[in-house]
Amino acid sequence: MLKLVLGLAIAIAALPAFADVTSRDGGPSKSEMLARSNPGAPDGAAFFRPVLSGVLYRGGFSGGDKNRTGMSSAQRQSLCSEGFSRGFYADFGKNTEYSVTSCGGGSFDYQSARSSRPANVMKAIHDTIEGNKGPVYVHCMWGVHSSGALSAMALVQFCGWSESRAKAYWNDARNGAPCSGGCDAWIDRKFEGFSVNPALSISDAQRAAICPKG
């Protein structure tokens, strides 16, 4: 019996710990930001990556979303249960039924977004930072182009990155995926619709808690 108990204890200790997606613990590392996935991803997600710790994550669908119907009710419920408060489907959700999912004492508000018009996403991220709400999940069809563009803009807005640094991050994180009209031109067009909004500024302490390390 003692051997069985000890064996179970060792097995449980060896299980991977679930990530606390709400933790604002000093910002994600470069390896986490570029990983193929990270703990906390809902089933069927691809390229689930932190952008701002406890505040913003990005991703896409494993195998894409050819019907453009967005996340399933199970995926929304999973994100809600983990503590996410909002989700945005960037550019491709024309057949998606957006709604608010409830879970226990929380909720997950799923909305549409455009990577060429990022103001509402930036405002939602700022509300999350200031209101200490659960993180925002921004995704697109594959998790490389549109979600990456909005994430790059968030790094400029909230972490003080230069546009050139943010675009380099976008390029590194797109996993070699091609872009219509060329990738430099693609991301430049997206940034034409973005500018830093002084009304969405955050404190140095907030920046230190969420922005990428290094």
Image: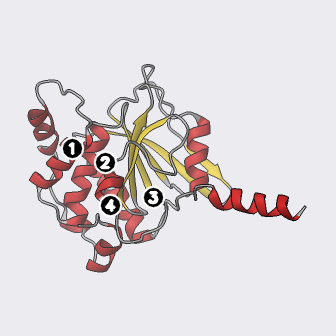
Task: Report the Cα–Cα distance between label 3 and label 1.
Answer: 23 Å
* Most foreground residue, 169 or 128: 169
Task: Look at the picture and state if 4 lies above or below 187.
Answer: below
Amino acid on which disc 2 is placed:
Leu
At x 70%, y 56%, the residue is 11
Q: Which residue is mark 3?
A: 135
Question: What residue occupies the far right of the structure in this picture?
Answer: 1
Quadrant of residue 15 within the rendered picture: bottom right
All told, the count of numbered labels is 4
Residue 8 coordinates in the image, percent (x, y): 77, 58
Q: Are marks 1 and 2 in contact (CB under 8 Å)?
A: yes
Label 3 neighbourhood size at 10 Å, few (<14), some (14-19), many (20+)? many
Q: Which residue is mark 4?
A: 29
Mark 2 vs mark 3, foreground winner is 2
- In the shown orientation, is residue 144 left or right of residue 71? left
Q: Mark 4 or mark 3, which is nearer the start of the sequence?
A: 4
* Most foreground residue, 214 or 63: 214
Q: Which residue is mark 1?
A: 172
Task: Report the Cα–Cα distance between label 2 and label 4.
Answer: 9 Å
- In the shown orientation, is residue 68 left or right of residue 79? left
Locate the C terminus by quadrant: bottom left
Residue 38 coordinates in the image, percent (x, y): 45, 49
Label 4 neighbourhood size at 10 Å, few (<14), some (14-19), many (20+)? some
Q: Which residue is mark 2?
A: 34
